[in-house]
Image: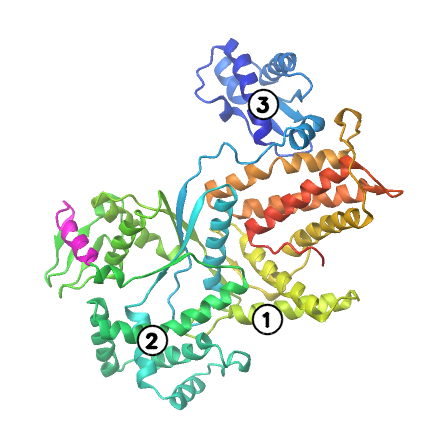
Amino acid sequence: MKVLKNKIIPLIETVLQDYDLEIEKYEDLIQDPRDRNVCDLCIPCFSLAKILKENPIKIAENISKKINELSGEDIEVKSLNGYVNFSSNPKWLANKLFLENYEFFEDVNKKNILIEHTSANPNGPFHVGRARNAILGDCLVRLNREIGNEVIAEYYVDDMGKQVGILSWAIENIPIDEVESILKNNQIDDLNPMWKNKEDHIRVRWYQAANILRKDNLKIEEELTEIINKSEEGDEEVLTKFNNAFQPILDGMLETLSKLGINYDSFTNESKFIIDGSVNKIMKDLEKSELFGEAENGAKYLELSEKGVSGKSTKFFFRRGDGSSLYATRDLAYHQWKWGKAEKLINVLGEDHRLQSKQVSVALNELNIKAPEVVFYAFIKLPEGKMSTRKGNVVFMDDLIFEAEEIALKLLSERNIKIEEKEKLKIAKAVASSAIRFNILKVSPEKGFTFKWEDALSFDSDSAPFIMYSHARSCSINKKVKNLGLKEETLELSEIEINNSISKLLRTIFRYEEAIEKSILENKPNHFCYYMLELSTAYNLFYRDCPIIVDSKINVFNYKVSEYSRKLLFRGCNALGIIPLESM
């Protein structure tokens, strides 16, 4: 709780000066408690006990006594089993919110940030495994914007190289009837009629068929090598063919992501850095490095064994023997370009990119270019194993979204609520999108998990619909007050009584900014997911225990608490990409 921490830091500094301790940052002594029912913040005195050679319980008692003499009524300080426990007076918190108009994130150092995420090869529809990158990256964009950072959401388009080369070759060389025959003979399902007009679902079948055909087919491999090499040399005709092949797929992918509230500010093609000459300059500069080496076939590399890179891949090849560049080389030019757009870079990558990311970081350092911040995430698996677009063993996001909408519609129908079908469909789409996002975001990025339909579409109390319903509840209170034409009276905090439910809700409200800041600092939205569940739970307890309208009169304080909660739930939902409906 930042507001409390700022209150107690000067008190701690004053008290601990008597102990003649060498402490650079007194705030580092302050911790969150294991049980928030005990206190809001605490100082464990066990490390101090080792320095002072005194009993930690005695130290905690002395510190508590001295701080209490200085603190007044705004906070309560108690010692317990070697801890100094700090609790906020709920009236002080209410005063901060409603009379002092406390604003979150006022002291945050705002930055310009570029977050590159998704950047999936445009060779087929999004599946659940790919979508983790997009959902995680989009949430980081939203969280950073919530605290006031200027953020560019960037998509790096692989418009050249092997994947789009295979796609382009397939569309040009394999007739549609042959595509279907190849896939049928290899037990790949027919095209879902629901997606018969969606190009990403249509064209991926050419990609899959080509990967089957090219096995042990030297002629196809030679043709692919020729066009891929031309693309990597910046051949305009080949790049145009590649673009014509993948752009309809990319459009379909983006349409899918838009259903999940995911959008981008800029798209940058990989070929840009071949065409503008920046890749050639990068390669020349790398040859000046002390790590530079050349293979027998003329390929050029950096030897990274002395830079913490171990195993078989200690050589970072940046130029082939024929003089052409590699993907990683173009990645260096891309990062150089990105630093011209922002003061902080974040890349969202799958865990299988760790080695490549390390190599790129070392190479950037050799070029005197700062490395980006990288968020690695573990993969989502099916019960049968890893998902693969090439092999066809995937759960497509379009299918998952449709299934989620159908389940949400069924649940709404079972509640027998009288609403128009159009409104019911709107609610179902919002619930489906939010539930899918939250199911992925609530798991820490470094933890993999097995995708299960029943988990993804759960509407239990640890889900997005639970948060959405809490927001809708607060909106219903707002609507009732407005419909009754009730007028607010002047708020006199000195006269109000604050029960446990209000106290808990106020304390939870004031943890909003630290919950977001922790998620941003660690690049882990799961922290904020669980905060939003706590905020929703606290609001529901308040809703149960604290009536706002009694005998056609408004309880001014309770209504102000409800309204502040409503606005905060709305902000928090947007920060996670949950759709904050006004009714459900």
| Residue 279 shown in magenta | yes
| Residue 124 shown in magenta | no
In the image, what residue occupies the spot 52% across and 16% down? Answer: 13
Q: Earlier in the sequence, mark 3 or mark 1?
A: 3
Q: CA distance from mark 2 to mark 1?
A: 28 Å
Q: Are marks 3 and 2 in contact (CB under 8 Å)?
A: no
Q: Amino acid at mark 3?
A: Lys
In the image, what residue occupies the spot 50% across and 57% down? Answer: 135
Q: Amino acid at mark 1?
A: Phe
In the image, what residue occupies the spot 23% across and 75% down? Answer: 237
* Mark 2: secondary structure: helix
Q: CA distance from mark 3 to mark 1?
A: 50 Å
Q: Which-is-in-front pick, marks 3 and 2?
A: 2
Residue 201, compared with residue 548, is above or below; it is: below
Kindly identify which residue carries mark 3: 7
Neighbor class of circle 2 (other Cα within 10 Å; few <14, some 14-19, many 20+) is few
Residue 316 vs residue 453: left or right?
left
Kindly identify which residue carries mark 1: 402
Q: How many marks?
A: 3
Q: Amino acid at mark 2?
A: Asn
Q: Position of residue 377 (x, y in %)?
A: 44, 53
Q: Which residues are magenta?
A: 277-292
Q: Position of residue 233 (x, y in %)?
A: 19, 67
Q: Quadrant of residue 307?
A: top left
Residue 494 vs residue 522: left or right?
right
The label on residue 88 is none
Neighbor class of circle 3 (other Cα within 10 Å; few <14, some 14-19, many 20+) is some
Q: Position of residue 536 (x, y in %)?
A: 68, 46
Residue 180 showing in the rendered view: yes
Kindly identify which residue carries mark 2: 244
